[in-house]
Amino acid sequence: MALDGTGWHPASWRLPDARPSDVLTAGYWNDLVAEAERGLVDFVTIEDGLALQSDHPFRPDTRTDRLRGRLDAVQIAARVAPVTRHVGPIPTAITTHTEPFHLSKAIATLDYVSAGRAGVRVQVSSNPESALHFGRDIAEDTMAEAADYVEVLRRLWDSWEDDAEIRDAATGRFIDREKLHYIDFEGRWFSVKGPSITPRPPQGQPLVAALGHGDPAYRLIASSADLGFITPHHGDDIAGIADTIAALRPAGATPVRLIADLVVFLADTPTAAAAHRAQLDELLGREYISDAEVFSGTPVQLADLLQQWQAGGADGFRLRPAAIPHDLHQITGGLIPELQRRGIFRTDYPQSSLRGLFGLSRPANRYTHSQGGYE
């Protein structure tokens, strides 16, 4: 489930059941994520940015009929994690103007707070408006910079061995310093000594996700991500995307789980779904378009499409509700029960960690057998 404000349609905040006055409250996000967990979804992504939302991708607008303003996604995730038990929070983090050391400990902390359910979606930014907040130039190759950023994250998560904390009150030894490691990362954009100040996360490595519409984003997904959010517009597109990413994946690496994105307008009948979308478009003043495929129909029709796309090679789906709470409730109360009736969706959570839900084992620590720890 992809959560953003009152929904992905820009006019969603104007619907009678929307809660625009609550978007900046903890209770609002608790409610959304609790509803997602009621639907047994694996994860929720939370959108973020470093500039005020705008209809234009590279400059601010002057519109006053749009929802503007947001909370920090990592902070939202940290707030909702303790009041959920199963769903994995995956906040968005902008790698272009932030430091990997800070994010590494924030996501490691989120993994502790959620008892092993954390992930992070890394996103680049070429928006000049964002750059003005930080006084630094945008890298010539933001995707390569992001790949280095993720490498630093992963090394810092491993910089404490799993048994580095002794906590022996009798001997007065709390930590084994030989099991803390410098990561000594030297790259074009980052120079990070390490170790982290946060012990290795419960999952070892929280899941890393990235969204891609083509190269060079596919290279970032292939080199650095566990989950790749992709935007096919037909089921036939998926196999080609999968082949492209697989060819770029390092030899011997676990295959990336490819998650297809869809914006959904749902209702009990096709006519009602079309009317739902038309109402929002009328408020918007134009037809809504998206980077992802836009679906309008019933939960049963959406279930048919998901089955077709799964047969085409998708490992899963990230649904973007056009309007919250309407389409969120259509997913949890309509789509999920339909998939369960077909025997293609679970009826409980079989694993306690986010990695476990994706069939991923807890990875070994790269530094466990190295000599000469932190001194």
Image (cartoon, rainbow, N blue to C red):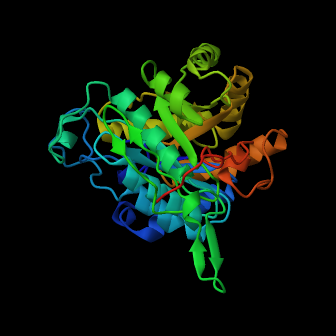
Residue 101 seen anywhere in this rendered image of the structure: yes
Residue found at x 53% / y 55%: 373
Q: Residue furthest bottom?
A: 170
Up the image or down, 52 lies above or below 80; here it is: above
* Image spot of residue 75 (x, y percent): 42, 62
* Image spot of residue 140 (x, y percent): 26, 25
* Image spot of residue 323 (x, y percent): 47, 47
Up the image or down, 207 lies above or below 144; here it is: below
Residue found at x 64% / y 49%: 368
Q: Quadrant of residue 307?
A: top right
Q: How many marks?
A: 0
Q: Is residue 10 left or right of residue 42?
A: left
Residue found at x 47% / y 28%: 220
Residue found at x 60% / y 60%: 35
Using the image as rendered, state which of residue 360 and residue 105 is in the foreground. Answer: 105
Q: Is residue 338 left or right of residue 120?
A: right
Residue 90 seen anywhere in this rendered image of the structure: no
Using the image as rendered, state which of residue 234 and residue 249 is in the foreground. Answer: 249
Up the image or down, 365 lies above or below 82; here it is: above
Using the image as rendered, state which of residue 33 and residue 10 is in the foreground. Answer: 33
Using the image as rendered, state which of residue 87 and residue 177 is in the foreground. Answer: 177
* Image spot of residue 112 (x, y percent): 58, 65
